[in-house]
Image (cartoon, grey):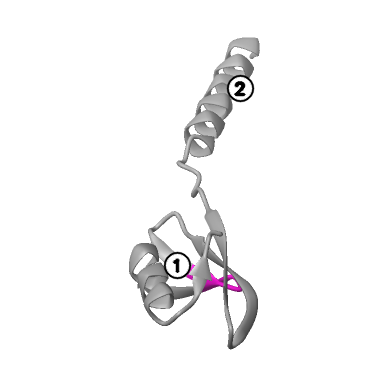
């Protein structure tokens, strides 16, 4: 009986270890502002997209930032 309990506990620990090793999405953010808007935060999601106010824009982060800068915004300064 004790062997079955130990085997079960080992199984549970292995499952927990495997599922907890999922790659965490890292999020990095920068602040942008323009004469027309108050300062706002643009974040790069783990999938590479930009998010504004927590909403995924569906646009790659670099493309989104470049578009903001071309439109006159200042980001990361």
Separation of residues labelled 2 and 1 (CA atoms): 42 Å
Q: Residues within 10 Å of mark 2 (few under 14, many from 20)?
A: few
Q: Residues within 10 Å of mark 1 (few under 14, many from 20)?
A: many
Q: Position of residue 63 (x, y in %)?
A: 33, 69
Choose between 38 and 45: the one closer to the eye.
38
**Residue occupying image coordinates x 38% and y 59%:** 48
| Residue 52 within the segment the image draws in magenta | yes
Q: Which residue is mark 1?
A: 50
Q: Which residue is mark 2?
A: 9
> 40 above or below 13?
below
Q: Position of residue 54 (x, y in %)?
A: 59, 70
Q: Position of residue 38 (x, y in %)?
A: 66, 80
Q: Main secondary structure of the magenta part?
A: strand
Choose between 17 and 64: the one closer to the eye.
64
Q: Is residue 25 left or right of residue 8?
A: left
Q: In which quadrant will I find the C terminus?
A: bottom right
| Residue 25 within the segment the image draws in magenta | no
> Upstream in the sequence, badge 2 or badge 1?
2
- Tell me how many marks there are: 2
Q: Which mark is residue 32?
A: none
**Residue occupying image coordinates x 42% and y 73%:** 69
**Residue occupying image coordinates x 44% and y 76%:** 57
Q: Is residue 12 left or right of residue 68?
A: right
Q: In which quadrant will I find the N terminus?
A: top right
Residue sticking out furthest to the top: 3
Which residues lie in the magenta part?
51-55
> 22 above or below 32?
above
Asked if the residue at tag 1 contacts the one at tag 2, i.e. Cβ–Cβ closer than 8 Å, the answer is no
Choose between 58 and 36: the one closer to the eye.
36
Indicate the secondary structure of the residue bearing disc 1.
strand
Label 2 or label 1, whichever lies nearer to me, is 1
**Residue occupying image coordinates x 49% and y 49%:** 25
């Amino acid at each position: 009986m004790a062997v079955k309990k130990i085997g079960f506990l080992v199984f549970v620990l292995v499952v927990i270890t495997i599922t907890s090793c999922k790659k965490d999405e890292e999020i990095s953010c920068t602040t942008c502002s323009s004469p027309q808007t108050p300062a706002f935060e643009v974040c790069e999601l783990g999938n590479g997209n930009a998010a504004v106010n927590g909403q995924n824009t569906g646009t790659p982060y670099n493309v989104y930032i470049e578009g903001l800068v071309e439109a006159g915004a200042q980001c990361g300064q």
